[in-house]
Amino acid sequence: MTHGYRTDLGRVGGERNSLREDLARHALLPLRIFLGITFIYAGIDKLTQGGFFSATGTGSVGEMMRSVRDSSAIPALVDLALKNPAGFGYAIAIGELAVGLGTLFGVFARLAAFGGALISLSLWLTVSWQSTPYYYGNDLAYLMAWLPLVLAGAPAFSLDAVLAGRRRRMR
């Protein structure tokens, strides 16, 4: 079926894509870029911030966890983090870095987005749970932002898309 708004922006199987189809295919790209860069930055920030991995002290993960323990939705999760604050801090920092890189470059994009959703969920249930009204806590918004990427992956401008194309050509 031919429409008057067709353009030569892209071809799939010899057929032209409409501008609308091209835009829809790339609709999640700004979200991927934002979340990827944000999580890379968050991971690097934690890894390079002096004192973050300490059990005590201003700006430490241990101090942050103690400050939210009684107001979190799942105090047992905070208690688990407090058993080894440095280990928990490194897990979050390295997790954020891996999620950010996977999302930005589209490498195991659904898995990376699922990891980002889990990080955001755990931070929402612990650190930002006490935010009133609830929409003042940004971790819930990040959780919701990850869900379209969990469902759709990275269909364009990604290593996943390149590898999927190669698999299709090899058949």
Image (cartoon, grey):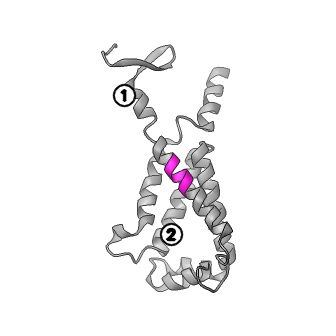
Q: In the rendered image, which residue does mark 2 sit on?
A: 123
- Magenta residues span 33-38
The quadrant of the rendering that contains the N terminus is top left
Give the number of marks: 2
Q: Residues within 10 Å of mark 2 (few under 14, many from 20)?
A: many
Instruction: Identify the disc placed on residue 91.
Output: none
Asked if one can make out residue 171 in the rendered structure from this viewpoint, the answer is no
Q: Position of residue 105 (x, y in %)?
A: 61, 43
Q: Residue at x 34, y 13 (%)?
A: 2
The answer to whether residue 32 is visible is: yes
State the SS at label 1: helix
N-terminal label among 1 and 2: 1
Query: Which SS class for mark 2?
Result: helix
Quarter of the rendering containing residue 3: top left
Q: Nearer the viewer, residue 42 or 13?
A: 42
Quarter of the image that includes the C terminus: top right
The reply to whether the C-beta atoms of the residues labelled 1 and 2 are less than 8 Å apart is: no
* Residue 100 % position (x, y): 59, 53
In front of the other: label 1 or label 2? 1
Identity of the amino acid at label 1?
Arg
Residue plotted at (43% across, 38% down): 27
Above or below for 52 versus 98? below
Residue 37, placed above or below residue 80: above
Give the crowd class for mark 1: few <14, some 14-19, many >=20 residues within 10 Å.
few
Whole-Å distance between the Cαs marked 1 and 2?
A: 37 Å
Name the residue beneath numbered marker 1. 20
Q: Is residue 79 above or below residue 139?
A: below
User: Quick one: 56 or 126, which is closer to the camera?
Assistant: 56
Q: Position of residue 53 (x, y in %)?
A: 67, 76
Please tell me whether the stretch drawn in magenta is mainly helix, strand or loop.
helix
